[in-house]
Image (cartoon, rainbow, N blue to C red):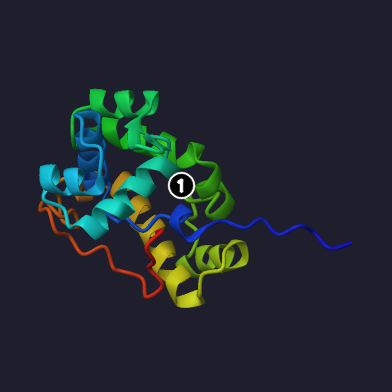
Amino acid sequence: MPTARRSLESKDIPQADSLENVRRIVDAVAEGAKTKADVAERTGINPRHVLYGLHTARVLGFLSEESGGFTPTEAAKALRGAESGSNEERETFRKAIQGSDIISAIAPELFSDKAPTQDAITQKIVKLTDLSESTAGRRAQTLISWRTQITQPSLFAGGVGSSGGADQDEGDDEEDNASA
């Protein structure tokens, strides 16, 4: 008997590499930014990357999406209560990543002792979405980047591999669309 294939939307597969920028976006929304343009203006992050960050924050449970835009959740309060770049902030991100149903579906062993390969995550994404293999590979790269940022503190918030700046290249997909 065939099994049902779970289908995830493109916007549900994170593409915001920088957890530091995700934090900045959550902060902006919590401080009253309601639209993508508001967040971009407050953070200096490119509007396209703001959209990636908003959806990433939603997938991680820091923001909820409503008809009027995004609003912070209780999890956002915990994130904002942690000092930026601290071990507490990294652990808050780790818990959010591990607690996300979407991330659990595509990379359940992301923080295991033996890290999943980018290819293994790519294949899960392809299986669960309508994304091409190349786009799925780019999204898998995002998750591998998160693992590195969380497990190697020197690369988190201001270290090597962190943008430290507003316009970090998030490695745009060729399948970006307006609903992403």
Left-right relation of 158 to 76: left
Q: Check the image and report above or below for 130 versus 157.
A: below
Q: How many marks?
A: 1
Spot the residue most to the front.
Answer: 67
Q: Residue at x 37, y 51 (%)?
A: 147
Type of residue at label 1? Answer: Phe
Residue 76 point in image, percent of width and height: 33, 29
Q: Residue at x 18, y 43 (%)?
A: 38
Q: Check the image and report above or below for 123 versus 64.
A: below
Disc 1 crowd rating (10 Å Cα; few below 14, some 14-19, many 20+) is some
Residue 29 point in image, percent of width and height: 24, 35
Q: Quadrant of the C terminus?
A: bottom left
Instruction: Say which of 123 and 44 sits in front.
Output: 44
Residue 111 point in image, percent of width and height: 46, 47
Q: Check the image and report above or below for 126 versus 72.
A: below
Instruction: Say which of 114 and 2 sits in front.
Output: 2
Instruction: Say which of 18 and 151 sits in front.
Output: 18
Residue 105 point in image, percent of width and height: 58, 51
Q: Check the image and report above or below for 47 versus 95.
A: below
Spot the residue most to the right.
Answer: 1
Q: Residue at x 76, y 57 (%)?
A: 4
The secondary element bearing badge 1 is classed as loop
The residue indicated by pointer 1 is 111
Q: Quadrant of the N terminus?
A: bottom right
Left-right relation of 119 to 45: right
